[in-house]
């Protein structure tokens, strides 16, 4: 029992950043029906920008925060470019086409990053204000992990409020339901789509900057987080932000429990949960059925 | 009514294909018809095959620089075989097996006699037979292993200037209990593939019978894993014995090692261990941590450039800095450097520049390298028998590359390599 | 021989083309048993047709055989040894792309798990390389195994939305990669090397010059079978389920069964390509199973044109030569491939083979908008 509580706490600390990574992905899919394969690549770009801007050494707290937000903003701007240049032309062509386009973007981003930033991985130290750890019920949680959880929860609340309470959110939901009808009712679908996509990219860049100090910034970042993000999104239900949060935290706890009690199973824990979920409830925890008989 | 497929005109598909093939053939014969023997104009080309892109591309960059330094030094001293200059050609080692074989074949058709390739073991396995059938002497600066260089090796003409995993593991197993006599438990975190899991068991094997340290728990993660927070918090919760009695072994490499160490530093786990040991090169990750690298005991052939005080190494480092300002040579640079030294030696000693003569000239040759004088293995082992160095590296903000060596042990090459083939 | 005179919508008996499918179902050829769907409007024409169709097919086969002979003997004289190797790998990639397109183009299912079939085919052949089984038979065995795997995978995943299907195939493919990496039986991270090629009918194929005709014949045989298969009722039904799943189901088509068989064919053809590749490269390792390879398969289909019968083969050839030859020494080939990918999607979604009819037909977005309008 003295290992169970730390495992759960460790799992939450693992899962919430995972949600942060998956949040942009599920938002963009939920509203635009575009599965942005390049999400991992945008995350990687955000991490690179962040680490490169700060230079790797420890900086002041404000510079640190500024760089995180800045990385998100720059990736969001990149998102404008990508959306105008490619995705906006593909909205009517079906989800597979934009999936393929985003895959091409992923290849491009993972190819260009080493050209710009070199082959060696980058690291970024924490500001001294965030260094240190706290022990909760036997689990050593670093102060920064608290920050990550805070950011993740904040993003979850923010997205929830955005989608349910703001005008943009209502319009985005309308566009998701029926684009033509929304346009007929006066919603500027192109503008709404663009904004949502940019927000998704901002979240990707932000997530990249947030995970950078606890990891190493290299091209591997794109693929290593994207697979688990996909798993979280599928398990939570495509398009559901709350589902992604629950799924991510759940996956984190399960992973942590596996590491503690069944280490040999741990690399496969995500896949097992995915398989079980898809067999029992193919639309995910909080997903909706898209069409008759389809998930 | 909708069309379910697009209407096609006669044979365009087939004609397109034929056009493509003919076009390629035409291009091909024009482009490559002017390849002659590279030994014609008083110049001998040495080949180097390594990945130019991907996570391990840095190894190729380092190796290329190390090889270039050696070539420049040799050319300045008069070249080989009475005045012929050496030149370096780098080819890509793509991820797919056929690609590395193609690189070797290209070198074969260009008449390159010695190739330092490949860097990754699956590609070495694939291209070694091709090198042999093409008459190329293969000195890999990246691969080693019983099947490639041991007594039961399959390719008689394959040599390796890389340290073997088992030799390095043996060295660690030898040094760790001696330097840290109070440590009783070992935790292992590594990549879930053969070198990752095997090196841990090699180290355990060196302790068999005496059991100074016991492996308490092992965690193996997939190769692309960059998120170690679960493992770190689990180890943090279970490694509760006195810090002086616990040790940690890492068989991760590159960004995985970095990510793990970052998490450990942030959660304070570093302080729970008397030592952290690594079976892969730690120098590059240490540099990436910009002066804040935790102290890690590493076992390799050239653990740290500043650890060897002899004229050969001084010149090596100085010349390396000239072609790569601000960058110090790493293990890969060293391995490629001595590979070129050995290649030059073989070229000088051999009667004719063909595979058989070069190979027998290389066996047993004595090389004066940056870590001292050593021999190339003879008929029973085509390994370069330089000493294995066990060094503790750590961050030092005042050092030019942010890294300092805090301690060093040297295990003679013959000893560590003789253990290597008991696999 | 010119059956154009029979009906305006009859398929023209030309070598190696995609069959135009118009309002009437294409006539099944003589060797195919009549199906219930053909009992409709096509039946009137059935009796005179098979003879001509059979003669048309034979002429195509003769042309293909002639091409095989010419290429087998002629090409090694014209190209360098390195380029010959690249061309052989191009044949392998071509097969890989052809298999992939059964799912991507014909069934409309984007799959990121194709690499698993390609790699598995290679591993099967590599594991058999010390036995006395003849190389073509090894390919068939490998193909059968990967076809079975494809059937299982496709049936298991058939009921998912296209997007979920894509992500799940990615996950499944990565799982297989992980397993291969850790399984000593298949060599772990080092894979299996060397893989001996063996000999066919007493002639050793260890040299590239001898291997090339073997590769060409394998490619030709599979291509002919592929082409015949394309003209079957099954593929028509498959495309129906691609274009409108609900309507196809209402017509009594079992989407799961269709996709299952499509998965089997895709897996089988890709597996044969992988087996040929392992024989050529003389080695196999897990990098062939990584999802990069699946992305390359899709790229090849897109490059040539997923809606064309020979699109994937053309795409495969161009990719293999482009990457094998021209891009082989660049630092980051992904940059170029990524840009090409995006350009293809935006500007030329029909692939290179659509260039000719581009002026006539609308591009994908416009066609899709048109399609939506008729639904």
Image (tube, coloured by chain):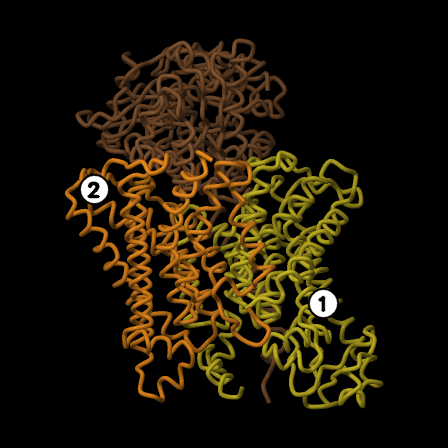
* Chain shown in brown: B
The picture places residue A13, in percent across and down from the top left corner, at 36, 45
**Is any atom of residue C213 visible in this view?**
yes
Q: Can marks 2 and 1 be said to lie on one chain?
A: no
**Is any atom of residue B108 visible in this view?**
no
Q: From this view, report whether residue B112 is shown above or below residue A165.
A: above
Identify the image quadrant of residue C159: bottom right
Left or right placement of residue C301 versus residue C15 in this view: left
The picture places residue C282, in percent across and down from the top left corner, at 62, 40
Q: From this view, report whether residue B66 is shown above or below residue C98.
A: above
* Chain shown in yellow: C
The picture places residue C232, in percent across and down from the top left corner, at 73, 74
Q: Nearer the viewer, residue C36 or A274?
A: A274
Tint applied to chain A in the drawing: orange
Residue named by callout 1: C63
Task: Write down the chain letter for disc 2.
Answer: A
């Amino acid at each position: 029992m003295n290992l169970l509580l730390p495992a759960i706490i460790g799992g939450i600390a693992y899962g919430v950043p995972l949600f942060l990574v998956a949040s942009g992905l599920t938002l963009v899919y939920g509203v635009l029906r575009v599965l942005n394969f390049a999400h991992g690549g945008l995350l990687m770009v955000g991490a690179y920008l962040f680490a490169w801007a700060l230079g790797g050494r420890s900086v002041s707290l404000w510079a640190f925060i500024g760089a995180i937000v800045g990385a998100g903003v720059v990736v969001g701007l990149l998102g404008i470019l990508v959306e105008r240049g490619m995705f906006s032309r593909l909205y009517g062509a079906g989800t597979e086409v934009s999936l393929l386009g985003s895959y091409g973007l992923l290849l491009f981003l993972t190819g260009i990053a080493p050209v710009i930033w070199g082959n060696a991985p980058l690291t970024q130290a924490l500001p001294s204000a965030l260094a240190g750890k706290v022990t909760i019920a036997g689990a050593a949680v670093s102060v920064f992990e608290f920050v990550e959880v805070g950011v993740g929860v904040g993003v979850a609340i923010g997205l929830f409020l955005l989608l349910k309470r703001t005008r943009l959110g209502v319009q985005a939901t309308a566009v998701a339901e029926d684009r033509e009808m929304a346009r007929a009712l006066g919603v500027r679908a192109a503008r709404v789509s663009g904004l949502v996509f940019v927000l998704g990219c901002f979240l990707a860049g932000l997530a990249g900057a947030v995970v950078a100090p606890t990891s190493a910034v290299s091209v591997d970042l794109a693929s290593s987080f994207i697979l688990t993000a996909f798993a979280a999104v599928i398990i939570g239900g495509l398009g559901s932000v709350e589902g992604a949060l629950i799924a991510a935290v759940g996956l984190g706890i399960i992973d942590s429990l596996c590491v503690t009690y069944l280490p040999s199973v741990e690399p496969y824990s995500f896949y097992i949960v995915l398989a079980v979920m898809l067999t029992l409830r193919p639309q995910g925890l909080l997903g909706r059925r898209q069409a008759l008989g389809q998930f | 009514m909708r069309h379910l497929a697009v209407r096609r005109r006669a044979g365009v598909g087939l004609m397109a294909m034929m056009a493509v093939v003919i076009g390629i053939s035409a291009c091909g014969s024009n482009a490559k018809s002017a390849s002659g023997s590279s030994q014609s104009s008083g110049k001998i080309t040495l080949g180097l095959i390594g990945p130019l892109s991907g996570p391990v591309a840095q190894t190729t960059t380092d190796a290329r620089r190390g090889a270039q330094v050696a070539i420049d030094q040799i050319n300045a001293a008069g070249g080989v075989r009475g005045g012929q200059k050496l030149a370096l050609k780098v080819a890509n080692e793509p991820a797919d097996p056929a690609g590395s074989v193609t690189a070797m074949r290209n070198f074969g058709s260009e008449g390159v006699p010695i190739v330092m390739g490949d860097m990754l073991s699956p590609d070495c396995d694939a291209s070694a037979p091709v090198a042999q059938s093409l008459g190329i002497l293969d000195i890999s600066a990246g691969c080693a292993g019983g099947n490639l260089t041991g007594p039961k090796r399959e390719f008689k003409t394959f040599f390796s200037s890389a340290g073997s995993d088992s030799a390095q593991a043996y060295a660690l197993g030898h040094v760790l209990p001696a330097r840290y006599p109070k440590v009783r438990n070992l935790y292992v975190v590594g990549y879930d593939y053969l070198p990752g899991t095997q090196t841990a068991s090699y180290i355990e094997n060196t302790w068999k019978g005496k059991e100074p340290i016991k492996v308490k728990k092992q965690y193996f993660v997939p190769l692309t894993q960059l998120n170690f927070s679960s493992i770190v918090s689990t180890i943090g919760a279970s490694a509760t014995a006195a810090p002086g009695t616990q040790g940690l072994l890492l068989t991760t490499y590159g960004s995985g090692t970095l990510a793990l160490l970052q998490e450990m530093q942030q959660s304070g786990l570093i302080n729970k261990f008397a030592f952290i040991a690594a079976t892969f090169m730690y120098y590059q990750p240490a540099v990436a941590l910009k002066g804040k690298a935790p102290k890690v005991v590493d076992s390799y052939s050239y653990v740290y450039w500043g650890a060897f005080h002899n004229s050969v190494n001084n010149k090596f480092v100085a010349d390396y800095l000239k072609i790569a300002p601000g960058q110090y040579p790493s293990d890969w640079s060293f391995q490629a450097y001595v590979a070129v030294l050995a290649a030059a030696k073989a070229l000088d000693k051999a009667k004719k520049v063909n595979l058989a003569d070069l190979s027998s000239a290389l066996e047993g040759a004595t090389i004066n390298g940056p870590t001292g004088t050593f021999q190339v293995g003879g008929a029973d082992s085509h390994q370069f028998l330089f000493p294995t160095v066990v060094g503790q590296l750590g961050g030092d903000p005042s050092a030019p590359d942010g890294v300092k060596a805090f301690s060093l042990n040297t295990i003679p090459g013959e000893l560590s390599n003789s253990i290597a083939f008991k696999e | 021989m010119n059956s154009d005179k029979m009906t305006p919508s009859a398929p023209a008996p030309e070598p190696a083309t995609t069959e135009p499918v118009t309002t009437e179902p294409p006539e099944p050829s003589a060797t195919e048993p009549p199906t219930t769907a053909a009992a409709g409007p096509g039946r009137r024409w059935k009796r005179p047709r098979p003879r001509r169709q059979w003669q048309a097919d034979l002429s195509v086969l003769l042309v293909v055989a002639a091409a095989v002979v010419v290429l087998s003997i002629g090409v090694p004289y014209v190209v360098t040894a390195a380029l010959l190797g690249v061309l052989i790998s191009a044949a392998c990639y071509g097969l890989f792309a052809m298999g992939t397109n059964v799912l991507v183009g014909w069934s409309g299912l984007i799959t990121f798990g194709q690499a698993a079939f390609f790699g598995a085919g290679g591993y099967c052949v590599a594991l058999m390389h010390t036995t006395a089984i003849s190389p073509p038979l090894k390919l068939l065995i490998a193909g059968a195994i990967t076809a079975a795997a494809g059937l299982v995978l496709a049936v298991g995943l058939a009921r998912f939305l296209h997007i979920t299907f894509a992500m799940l195939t990615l996950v499944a493919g990565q799982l297989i990669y992980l397993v291969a990496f850790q399984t000593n039986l298949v060599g772990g991270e080092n894979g299996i090397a060397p893989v001996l090629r063996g000999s066919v009918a007493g002639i050793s194929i260890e040299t590239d010059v001898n291997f090339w005709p073997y590769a060409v014949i394998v490619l030709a045989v599979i291509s002919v079978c592929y082409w015949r298969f394309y003209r079957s009722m099954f593929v028509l039904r498959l495309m129906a389920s691609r274009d409108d799943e609900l309507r196809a189901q209402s017509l009594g088509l079992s989407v799961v069964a269709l996709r299952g068989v499509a998965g089997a064919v895709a897996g089988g053809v890709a597996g044969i390509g992988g087996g040929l590749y392992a024989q050529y490269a003389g080695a196999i390792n897990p990098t062939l199973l990584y999802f990069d390879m699946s992305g390359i398969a899709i790229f090849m289909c897109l490059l040539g044109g997923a809606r064309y019968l020979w699109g994937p083969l053309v795409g495969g050839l161009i990719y293999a030569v482009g990457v094998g030859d021209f891009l082989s020494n660049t630092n980051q080939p992904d940059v170029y491939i990524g840009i090409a990918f995006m350009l293809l999607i935006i500007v030329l979604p029909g692939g290179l083979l659509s260039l000719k009819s581009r002026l006539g037909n609308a591009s994908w977005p416009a066609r899709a908008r048109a399609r939506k309008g008729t639904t």
